[in-house]
Every structure is written in structure tokens, then in C-alpha cells.
Amino acid sequence: MSLAYRVSKYNRERKWKIFLKEIDPKPEMSVLDVGYSANEMSETDNFIEKFYPYPQMLTALGLEDPANFRKMYPQVECLQYDGTRFPFEDQSFDVCWSNAVIEHVGTREQQLNFIRETKRVAKRVFFTTPNRYFPVEVHTRTPLLHLMPKSVFESYLRFIGKGWATGSYMNLLSSGEIKTLLQEANITEFEIIKNRLMGFSLDFVVIINSGEN
């Protein structure tokens, strides 16, 4: 098992413990998972489907064809959408969970829409995202170069054969940028928890509470 994988597994377990503590799942609680993986690359994919104690109360939403996901998690309702408006009525769920998805949804405007949609359909929101300023870019395992202009970083990624991580694939956020997005979405009741590694903030857990429009 690689060091990077061990760190990823440890951090996902850490975020899961925060979710259990802060959200306190109950049998009657309906939960939306935004950003399922149709084809799992590791045992940490689809984390909530693997460990949520009431899988029949889960609904998964994503861009990929759900056929394979449904075979893996037959108790979970699964819907495919186009990446814009979530196909649910307002306040359809008690909680929306989204783990390391917002950095992949595209432009800043698309990230803002993503936040608005999570809050529109759920009473509480729990989402996570890597810290833009962590010394190592966690998707590509690249140190420091992601702190340079995006064009420079992407030129390097193409050079080393990781062009899949360029373009709209990844737009990382800092804590300040997350706060700005939340404020633009008219959300004021929120908490940002910093998960640290070696003294640096590795990623953020963002919890949006009820009572916001």
C-alpha cells in the first residue's frame, strides 16, 4: 500500500468521523450523496455508501451512467444528471453529503451553482475539498507546482503524462475562496473545519446549517 493511499484512507476516515459526530445519522434521516463513482478505483471511493448505517435512506447523484453503481449498491437510489440543476424539489433531503467533488465541477460560477444547489435541496450540507495551498497537489501527487499559474502547472502535467488533470478537471479552493462562495450564495450559517497534516491544512470540511435560503 503506497504512502499516498494510506494518507488518503486515513483522511477519509477522519472526515467520516467528523460527519458522524456533527450530523449524527438517524434511521429516518434522508441523505443525498452528490458525486458517486460508477467505477471504483480504490476502496475509498463511494465512502458513504460503504459505511452509512442506513443505506436505504441514501440517494446518489452523479454524471456517470449509474448501471454499475446500482449493481454495487442495490439498496441506494441512484440518479444521473447533467451537472446543472439537481433533479429534486427544494428541501427534499435532511442532509447533502459531497466528498471532494466541488473542485471538479468546473468554473467558479459552476462551483457557486453547486453550493446553491446542495443547500436548495437539503436542510444541512456536508462537503469537503482539498486545500489549494497544501504543499502537495493531492490528485496528481505533485509538490508545489500547483501554486504557480494554472497554465504553467497544466503544461507540466501534460509533459509528465497527466493531462487528464488539466482543463476543467480541477479548480482548487482556499478557505478564503470557500467563504466568498458561501457568502455569494447568501449562506452565513456555516463552519469550516481544517484537517491538518504535518502542520498544513490538507483539506476542508464545510458544514452548512439549516435556516438559510
Image: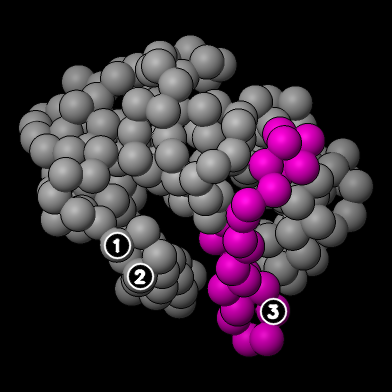
Type of the residue with mark 3: Phe
Residue 72 inside the magenta-drawn segment: no
N-term-proximal mark, 3 vs 2: 2
Q: Is 18 above or below relative to 180?
A: below
How many residues crowd around disc 1 within 10 Å: few (fewer than 14), some, or many (20 or more)?
few
Report, in whole angstroms, how far the alpha carbon at label 1 lies from the one at label 2.
6 Å
Q: Which residue is mark 3?
A: 200
Q: Nearer the viewer, mark 1 or mark 3?
A: 1
Residue placed most toward the observer, 159 or 179: 179
Placement of the N terminus among the 4 image quadrants: bottom left
Can you give x and y, in whole percent of width and height, for residue 62 in the image? 39, 26
Q: Which residues, given as a range, are shown in magenta?
A: 182-206
Amino acid type of disc 1?
Asp
**Is residue 198 rendered to the left or right of residue 12?**
right
Q: Secondary structure at mark 3?
A: strand
SS of the residue at dot 2? Answer: helix
Residue placed at 59% from the left, 68% from the top?
A: 193
Q: Which residue is mark 2?
A: 21
